[in-house]
Image: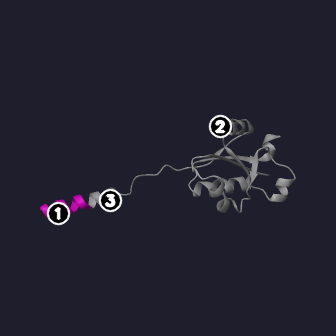
């Protein structure tokens, strides 16, 4: 009987290990006014369009890291995973992809401005 109780206690202990739920991190969609507030707080603004698109016009104080390279280059630019990062593109598709890439890499304060025209 003692063995059965010990076995049940061990099984219960093992079953409880690793069941702690992690908080799910998602990007937050923002508008231009919210972008300005975040920039005052020190957020990093990233344009995820191509270098050619960036050279044709971009938002002030933005850095160009394409959607295809953001996963490779972001860690040299932003080492603290808690840093506020804002991403944008032409239509909102690439920024959504880039935002998810950042979240998958462990960044916890990711904001998606969507299309840069939202701030015209």
Q: Nearer the viewer, residue 120 or 107?
A: 107
Distance, label 1 to label 3, CA atoms, is 16 Å
Instruction: Give the dominant element type of the magenta stretch: helix, strand or loop.
Output: helix
Query: The C terminus is located in which quarter?
Result: top right
The numbered mark at residue 41 is 2
Mark 3 Cα shell of 10 Å, populated few (<14), some (14-19), many (≥20): few
Marks 1 and 3 close (CB-CB < 8 Å): no
Element marked by disc 2: loop
Residue 94 figure quarter: bottom right
Q: Which residues are magenta?
A: 2-10
Q: Which residue does the numbered mark 3 point to in the structure image?
A: 15
Residue at x 40%, y 52% (from the top left corner): 20
Pointer 2 or 3: first along the chain: 3
Q: Is residue 4 magenta?
A: yes
Q: Does residue 91 appear to the left or right of 20 in the view shown?
A: right
Which residue carries the number 1 mark? 4
Asked whether 77 or 119 is in front, the reply is 77
The earlier-in-sequence mark between 1 and 3 is 1
Nearer to me, 43 or 31: 43
Residue at point 87% right, 53% down?
56
Secondary element type, mark 1: helix
């Amino acid at each position: 009987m003692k063995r059965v109780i010990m076995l049940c206690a061990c099984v219960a202990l093992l079953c409880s290990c690793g069941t702690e739920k992690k908080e799910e991190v998602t990007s937050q969609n923002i508008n231009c006014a919210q972008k300005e507030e975040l920039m005052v707080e020190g957020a990093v603004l990233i344009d995820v369009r191509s270098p050619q698109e960036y050279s044709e016009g971009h938002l002030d104080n933005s850095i160009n890291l394409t959607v295809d390279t953001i996963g490779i280059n972001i860690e040299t630019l932003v080492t603290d995973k808690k840093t506020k990062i804002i991403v944008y593109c032409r239509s909102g598709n690439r920024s959504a992809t880039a935002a998810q890439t950042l979240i998958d890499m462990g960044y916890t304060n990711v904001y998606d401005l969507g299309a840069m025209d939202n701030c015209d």
